[in-house]
Amino acid sequence: MKARMAAATERRWSRALPDRTDIGRILIIKWSALGDVVLASAAFEDISRAFPEARIDLSIFPPWDRLFRHDRRFTKLIVVDARRRRSRWRAQFEWVRAVADGNYDLVIDLQSTDHTRTLLAMLPLVGGDIRFKLGHHRHFPYNIAPPAMDAHRHALAVSRAALAAGGIVAGSPRPVLQVPTERKHAAECLLRDAGLLGQRYAVFLPGCQQAGYLKRWGAEHYAALARELCPELVDRVLLPAGPEDRQECARIAELAGACVVYRDNQEIVDLIPISEQAHFIVANDTGTAHVAAGSGTPMVVICGPTDPRRVRPLGPNVRTLQADLSCVNCYLKHCEHHRCMRMIEPQMVHELLCELLAGVSSGSLPGRDVIDWRVRRDASGGNRLAP
C-alpha cells in the first residue's frame, strides 16, 4: 500500500515534458549571485537541448544579464531587479506583467525561493497563469518538482533533480557560456600585450566580494605560490583583476615580482578564452572561478568557510582543497583566527597541482562531486595533505 502511494506521489509531481507538443514558450528564472548563475548555465544548456524548437526566455537580475545578451539559446531576457528597495513593488509588478504577457506554457524556476514562488502565485491575478510550473520544492505554486533533498547537495545537483522531475536529461559537464567573437579578440589582445601568447602561464583568481573576505587565501600566500611555481610548472602567472580584486591583485604583483602579470578592465566573459590557453587555474571560492571553469582548464579551488560540496565549480577538471577543522563550512562573515586558510600552505597547493596535471596528462582524471583534498594535522603537529 505504501509503495503504491509513493508511486502515485511521484507520478503526480513528474512529467515527461520534452515529449509534449504543447510546450512552445518557456521561461527560465535564475535570480542569484554570479557563481550560481554561471553554474545554472549548464542547466540552461540541458533545457535548450531538450526543447530545440521552443522559444526560451530568461529572467535574470542585473548585472549578470550581460553574460547572456548574445546567447543564441534565449529569445528574450527579462531583466527586472525585484530586489531594489526603492520602487520595489513597482519592479515586482513590472515582472509579473512581463511574465503574464509572455504567454508561457512552462516556467522552470531554478531559484525557487519564497520570493519567486510568491510572484508566480500572483500571475492568475493578472490573467497570466502558466500551465506547467517546475521548481525545486513540492510546494505551491509548482506542479512539477523532485523529492526533498539533502541540504548539503551541490546547487546544480538540486536543479538537475528538478529537471529530472520534468523528464529533462541533465548531462552538461561544465558551465556553458557563449563568448562573442569580439570578446575572444579582446582576450587574445590582452594575452599578446602581456607577452603570454604561446607561453606556459597560470591564472590566479585571488579575490571575492568584500563582504566575504574570509574566503580569500591571502596575497602573501598567492605571491609565495607564484614564486614557487615559476619556472618549474609555468613561466608566468596572470592576474586578471575585476573591480573587487584590484587591490588584492596589485598586492600580489608587488610581492611576487616579475613572475606575475597584472591586468584589469576585461569583461567577465573574457575569462573563458583567457583560461582556455592557461596551463592551470588557482582560485578562491569566487564567482569568477565558476566562469573560468567553463574553459575546461585544470583548476584548484581553495575553500575555507564555505562547503566545497555546495560551492565547487562544475567540471571534472576541478579539485578543491580545505583544512580539516571542526569549524569549516561556518559561512561566517568575521573570524578572529582564520585558521581554515592559514593551515593551507603554498607547497600543498603546488603538490595538488602536480597530482591534478599528472591525471590530465595520463587521461585518468575522474570527475568527483566531493571534497577532493584536505589539510590535516599529523602526529608531530605539522600539516599534511590527505585525499
Image (cartoon, rainbow, N blue to C red):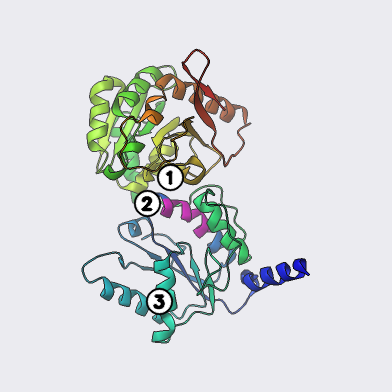
Confirm whether residue 93 shows in the render. yes
Q: Nearer the viewer, residue 270 or 65?
A: 65
Specify whether residue 38 is painted magenta. yes
Q: Nearer the viewer, residue 368 or 45?
A: 368
The kind of secondary structure element at disc 2 is helix
Image check: 160 left or right of 125?
right
Q: Nearer the viewer, residue 333 or 14?
A: 333
Q: Which residue is mark 3?
A: 99
Q: Which residue is mark 2?
A: 34
The kind of secondary structure element at disc 3 is helix
Three-letter code, disc 1? His
| Magenta-colored segment: predominant secondary structure | helix
Mark pair 3, 1: CA separation? 29 Å
Query: Do labels 2 and 1 touch, CB within 8 Å?
Result: yes
Q: On the rendered image, what quadrant is the N terminus found in? A: bottom right
Q: Which residues are the magenta region?
A: 36-45
Q: Position of residue 14 (x, y in %)?
A: 64, 69
Residue sitting at the far right: 1
Q: Residue at x 38, y 57 (%)?
A: 32
Q: Position of residue 198 (x, y in %)?
A: 40, 29
Three-letter code, disc 3? Val
Which callout, 3 or 1, points at the residue further toward the start of the chain? 3
Residue sitting at the far top: 380
The kind of secondary structure element at disc 1 is helix
Seen in the picture, residue 313 relative to 201 is either above or below; the reply is below
Q: Position of residue 302 (x, y in %)?
A: 43, 33
Give me the disc on residue 290. 1
Q: Position of residue 74 (x, y in %)?
A: 44, 65
